[in-house]
Image: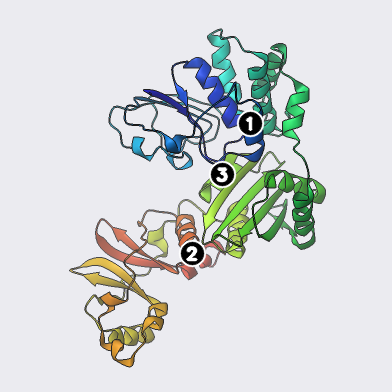
Amino acid sequence: MKQIITTHKNTDFDGLASAAAASLIFPEAQVLLPRQINPNVKAFLSLHKEVFDYPRAAKQDLRDVEHLIVVDTNSWRRLEGLDALRDKKGLSITLWDHHPGTGDLNPSWACRETVGANISLMVRTLKERKIQLSAIQATLFLIGLYEDTGSLSFPSSCAEDAYTAGYLLDHAADLTLAGRFLNPAYGEQQKDVLFELLKSGERRKVNDYRVAMGKLVLGGHVENLAMVVRMYMNITNVDAAFGLFQSRKQDKCMVIGRANHDRLDIGRIMRSMGGGGHPAAGSAVLRGANPQALETMISDLIAGNQQTSVQISDLMSFPVVTVDVDTSMADAGLVLRKNGCTGLPVIQDGRLAGILSRRDFKRLRKSSQIDLPVKAYMSRKTRTIKPGESPLKAAQTMIRHDIGRLPVVDGDQLIGIVTRSDTMRYFYDLLPD
């Protein structure tokens, strides 16, 4: 298995179609799909297993892979089961991607253009190489194209997408079959979720955009949530809609966004939150995140309050009040109270060794433990940030890991600290001129 083809996690029809197209361009390559694929894609694969029988990447031995072909994403983070290849020397990477930005894959060859659907780029190559399509391949490609362009109705659609649709219809793409998979069944679960979004969701104006946001706690898995969010957007008649779905059983929150405005880029918003997508649609999954904080973040991203010229070095506090690893908990408590702070970086031999917060004092069970050193109670899993990073990056990190402060490090030196309050003051335009 010297060549493999893959696409992004939570694979949609555009990702699957692009992977299938890549297998025609590289017939000796093996398609490896992520474990996480969309339910409607899973149903399609189940029905057409004899034609598109693709194994999962997480179960494969990748030691002999020399060539990686990636479609419909430009980020290592959005790939699954391929960490062993990330730093492999001599690995050749070929990329087709229609999302903005260059990502971090560093391909040897790439086709990057902002079109409505990635499959349009793939079909262009198939036409150039005069590779023939079967009716079922053309149908899958049309499903991918229509899903990502809203059947050519999304503002991100372009002329090449329309030409691609015509080409696929010329090759016997089945519109009836495409419609069946593009309009999955709307069942009781979906109806209940939509009802709750309509009942509890809020509409607001953000930079003259009409935006609807709904938050909901889910007791279990619900399929086709993206379809529900699109219906939520259409019914509320807004420019963009977001569904924030918190899992009752798992410490995670899924954010799904949809837009029908040509100046709103949902993909950019979701990439800022660690997910992905394209201008009309995207999603992200965040662990340990507060839905209320995510709602605020989405509004700020739409409003464009973050200015890339402002860096963490402009917000951080310095010099930093610290304690040594051998400082007693009693003395550290006095330092906290004296300085009115909720946490302290802990230093060992001049370097950051951990973080001590007020919540760590709750772990003291006996009065005698107050004399123990802070190294016995501090958190050693410290999250840090560099002075050149953005306030948005700091806010994302603090939300994702539920922490209130980030030490600012330059190399191995602690040069400052930035808190949740610092970032919120920035986002709400409370910085001094």
Q: In this rendering, is residue 61 above or below 25? A: below
Which callout, 3 or 1, points to the residue nearer the camera?
1
The residue singled out by tag 1 in the image is: 46
> Is tag 3's residue or tag 1's residue first in the polypeptide sequence?
1
Q: Residue at x 71, y 58 (%)?
A: 214
- Can residue 203 be seen here? The reply is yes
State how far apart marks 2 and 1 are (Cα).
Answer: 47 Å
Furthest-left residue in this view:
349
Determine crowd level at label 2: few under 14, some 14-19, many 20+ residues with C-alpha closer than 10 A: many
Secondary structure of the residue carrying tag 1 is helix
Q: Where is residue 116 in the image (x, y as percent from the top left)?
A: 64, 29
Q: In this rendering, is residue 308 above or below 340? A: above
State how far apart marks 3 and 1 are (Cα).
Answer: 32 Å
Q: Position of residue 356 (x, y in %)?
A: 34, 75
> Is tag 2's residue or tag 3's residue first in the polypeptide sequence?
3
The residue singled out by tag 2 in the image is: 423
Secondary structure of the residue carrying tag 2 is helix
Amino acid carrying label 3: it is Arg
Q: Where is residue 306 in the image (x, y as percent from the top left)?
A: 53, 55
Amino acid carrying label 1: it is Ser
State how far apart marks 2 and 3 are (Cα).
Answer: 20 Å
Q: Are marks 2 and 3 in contact (CB under 8 Å)?
A: no
Determine crowd level at label 1: few under 14, some 14-19, many 20+ residues with C-alpha closer than 10 A: few
What label sits on residue 268 in the rendered view?
A: 3
